[in-house]
Each structure stands twice: as C-alpha cells, then as structure tokens.
Amino acid sequence: MFQTPLPPTSAGLAEASWPEIAAWYDDLAGAELTAATRDDWLAAWSRLDELVTEAASLAMIAYTSDTTDKAKEAAHLRFSTEILPQLEEKEVALAKRFVAIGTDRDDLQTALRRFRTAIELFREANVPLTAEAEGLAARYQQVTGGMTAEWQGDRVPLPRLAPFLKVADRGVREAAWRAGVAPYVEARDELAGLFDRMVELRGEMARNAGFADFRDYTFVAKGRFEYTPADTERLHDAIEATVVPAVERVMAHRRERLELAALRPWDTAVDPRQREATAPYRDIADLEERAAAIFERIDPTLGGQFRTMMTEGLLDLEARPGKAPGGYCDTLHARGRPFVFMNAAGVAEDVMTLLHEAGHCFHAFASHARPLIWQRHPGAESAELASMSMELLAGPHLARPTGYYEAPDAVAARLEHLEDLLVALAHIASVDAFQSWIYTDPAGRDAAARDAAWLRFRERFERGVDWTGLEAERVARWYRQLHIFLYPFYYIEYGIAQIGALQVWRNARRDPEGAVAAYRRFLALGATRPLPELYRAAGVELSFEAGLLGELVTMVEEEMEVLRGSLAGVG
C-alpha cells in the first residue's frame, strides 16, 4: 500500500522531512478503497498515524524536559509548526475517503463522527495560523520553563519552593510564596503580548471556519457533541451554589485552626494542625516504588503496568532547571506505552500528581488493545475521569508500609486531598468562565481588560482568602495556568470528570471491587462509545446539575469531618 515501506519504529521518522511524510499519506490517498479493502486500508493509515504522532510526541517530551536545548527546541518546532499543521490537510483528505465509503461497525461510529467534524472544520487558511500559534506556545513554555527564584543563596526552579509553603514558620511561607509568584509578575507584559496574538489567531481561525467566535468553534472542534456552552454555564452556577460555600467553610476552618485574623495566600498549603510537613518519599525511586505498591493493592494488573513504565524509563518526574512547568501524560501509540512528565519537589502534591497521571497511563494501556488509533483516545472528559478517579481510588492505600505516610499523616493527606478537590472545582469554574469571556467579548483582546476580568471571576469563585495588596500577584495566577495559553478551553473537562470521579468514589465506598471492575471496563472502551455511555460504563452519570453536585459535596464534607475527628488531639 506504501511505495516506500514504513519504518518499523518512530525513530525512523525522527528526522523525516515533511515531503517524506506527506508521500506516505499521498500513497494512501491513491490506494484502492472499497468495502473489501477498507480494513487493511484503515490499519495502514492507523499505523502511519501511530508512527508520526509518536515521533512528534518524543520531540515534545525531549523539549519540555529541557527547554534550554536549542536542538531539542528546533526538533519540537519542526513537528509542531511545520509537520503537524500541514498534516491536518492530509488527514482530512483521507477522512473524506473513509466517510464516503462508511462502515456499520458500532465501534467506529464515534470515529466517523469525529472525521465528519474535521472535514467540516478544515480550512487551508488556518494551516499557517495553527503553525504560528504553536510557535507562540513553545515560546510560552520557554519563558516559564526558564523561570527560577533566588532562595537561600541559590537559584532554584519554582517547583522547588513548594515544600516551604508547608512549613510552620509563616514568614518563610510568605517569602517562598512571593518568590514563586514574582517571576510571573515580572513576565506579565511579555506573556500578555504572546496571548494578545494567540487571541487574534484563534478568532481568525474561528471566522475562517464560519463561526461567530472561538468558543463556538472550539466546542465543535473538541467533539463536545453531548453538551453545549449553556451546559457549562449551568455547571459554573452549580459550582458557585454548592462548592464555593464549602470552600469558604474549609478556609474558615483553616483560619481558625491556624489562629489567624485573616487567611493569606501563603497560608493555604500548610497543615492547619501546624505540624511541620514531612516529605512523603525519600527520592524519585521511592516515589515510583510506593506508587507501584499502591496500584498493586488496587488491582494487580494496574500495578504491573506501572512497573513496566518504571523499567522502560517512561517516567520523568524530578523538577530541574530548564524543565517546562506542569505535568502531563502522553501516549506513544506506535509502541503502546504512555509517558509521564512532572516536576516533583518532595511534597504531598507530587503524590497526587503521579496518581492522577497514572490514571491516564492505565487508560492508555487498556485502550491500546483497540486495533485503530482513533478507537483509543476519548475526549478529555473521559480521559480526566480515568485520572481523577484513580486519585480517589488510591486514597485508602496511602498509609505505610506500602504507601507514602505514617499514621496519622495518611489521614491528613486524605483530608488535604478532599479539601484541594473542592478548591480545584471552584478554580476550574473560574478558569472556564474566564476563557468563555475572553473569546466571546471583544474586550478579551485587551490585556488590561483580561486582567480586570480575571479578578472579577476570582471574586465570584474564590472566597475565604485575603488578597489585600496583592492584586498583581492575584492577576499573575492566570498567566501561570498553562492550559489557557497552550490548550484553550481544555479545563471544564476537569470539572465534569471530577463530578464523575466523586461518583466512582461513592461506588467504591460501597463496593470497592465492583467499582474498580467498572472503572477498568470503562478504560477498555477507549473512544468507541459516546460520552454518556462511557460514563455509564464506569457506573456514573454525566451531569451538570446542582442537585447531584450538592449531594457529592455533602459526602465530601461529611468525610472531611470524620477525618478531622480522627486527627483530633494528634500533633
């Protein structure tokens, strides 16, 4: 089917030029496609996509692991700004051929719907705009990845300040917090300039495709077939009504326990019992080993998959200078393996980040059994259900000897996770509402107006913390939210998935084995079913309603009271 045989691994494409890659797609475009040849043709296309996307992923992984390396930057930019934008046109041409012949296979109907959407949205004029946007995204990662702070006589990456936000000495906490925020305050003008152009490009892409604004365009482009912008606005309201008051109660409890007149931003991570935080792991090897032991207790198969990642070098966890911020899981489709990237700094958040990303890994392992690449990757709403559910399923297994904490620190860690979960839901609503405003209001093109709008949304969703005199630092929070820069509108999925994950947890409290079995059935479906069916497979409901969310928040608050009670009089 290919005039030039495909290389056996993605390494053969690491330095391939666009004309070389395009030739393989052109071969497929000219190959015979009938009902009799369809399966072989799809398999060939899928394998080609596996190799190309894996080569692109490996270039991105190498660059985010060291944003100071010019050769790695160039390799990443070659894929992200040259090859992948032009590849879209080739993919659409092949999708048109497949859609024209069709299939009645039930496990390909979601893929067919996505292909039809890609065909409808594609505009050749958007190819150079996408390439420019990817270049701006790489610049954002370079700027933020290079940020360091002066701390105790050394220049350190910002994630290394995290442990100092948990110490009992309030002066140290404040100093660490200010040191971590200052680089974003200083870079505000440069980052705002990058974002000005991003907003302009995204609006032009939407208009080229016939949409009034980028939000409407994005809902279609992301395959949000089962919900609308009105649904997400309803979820914002539900979070404001049920979660925000709960967060206020969390913050009031924290303020009282710390015996403070006002809770400041540097007071939100310290243990309110005022005990010095202990590192949950000795080193990166210990971080990995304890995670593997937890997964083995949840399900032996999951534990074995994580150990495969350990032995095959598929974990890059330690914070270091030049490394891009944040954490992610990427799938290497040609070899059927996930890869985890994060910035561990010796704090409890590292544990939850690894548990979260591992949920994505288990999704990748389970769905790789599907023969075609388009059957494996569901929308982010399902991907995040996999990861957020794993955080909660792991909760009962955090105690040593196999977990990370001695008692009662394991109880404190679970309590902190539940508190953070509520805070995160409020944060998610503010980020999504902010993005909706940016792309639907003409004022969103103005940097000063964006900063002012961010403060308005934070006032709506973030309560209980005193930000007096810290307006620039509060504004800087959205410049640190890399999703807004790199993955526009990829955030409400976390909220939708968290509501699903809380239901998985509710099921696990009643029937742990049954909940894990349902979770694994859901993982194995990959992208072969519509979103509501995938959620039902996991034993949960896709919901935007305040009623269900209120029930789940009540469950969380009741559990927090139980955990606080067990900690009473300790430390």
Image (cartoon, rainbow, N blue to C red):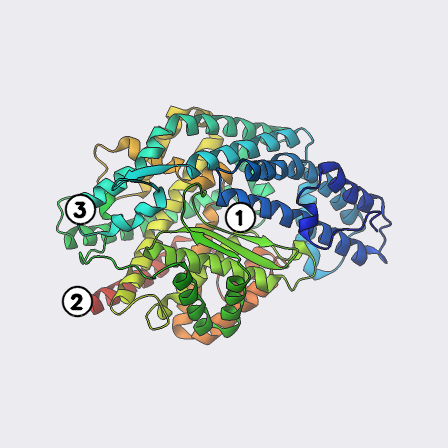
Upstream in the sequence, badge 2 or badge 1?
Answer: 1
Residue under label 3, please give it.
170
Mark 2 and mark 3: Cα distance apart in space: 21 Å
Q: Closer to the observer: label 1 or label 3?
A: 3
Q: Is residue 440 visible?
A: yes
| Number of residues whose C-alpha sits closer than 10 Å to that of mark 3, classed few (under 14), some (14–19) or many (20 or more) | some
Label 2 close to label 1 by CB (< 8 Å): no
- Specify whether 302 is left or right of 5: left
Q: Quadrant of residue 206?
A: top right
| Number of residues whose C-alpha sits closer than 10 Å to that of mark 2, classed few (under 14), some (14–19) or many (20 or more) | few
Mark 2 and mark 1: Cα distance apart in space: 46 Å
Residue type beneath disc 1? Tyr
Q: Quadrant of the C terminus?
A: bottom left
Upstream in the sequence, badge 1 or badge 3?
Answer: 3
Q: Residue at x 67, y 51 (%)?
A: 10
Mark 1 and mark 3: Cα distance apart in space: 45 Å
Residue farthest along the front direction in this orientation: 153
Q: Residue at x 43, y 46 (%)?
A: 326
* Figure check: 449 above or below 294: above
Label 1 close to label 3 by CB (< 8 Å): no
| Number of residues whose C-alpha sits closer than 10 Å to that of mark 1, classed few (under 14), some (14–19) or many (20 or more) | some
Label 2 close to label 3 by CB (< 8 Å): no
Q: Residue 280 location in percent, x, y?
A: 32, 61
Residue under label 2, please give it.
570
Q: Residue 57 location in percent, x, y?
A: 59, 47
Q: Provide the secondary structure element on which disc 3 rests.
A: helix
Q: Is residue 263 visible?
A: no
Residue under label 1, please give it.
227
Q: Residue 179 location in percent, x, y?
A: 28, 38
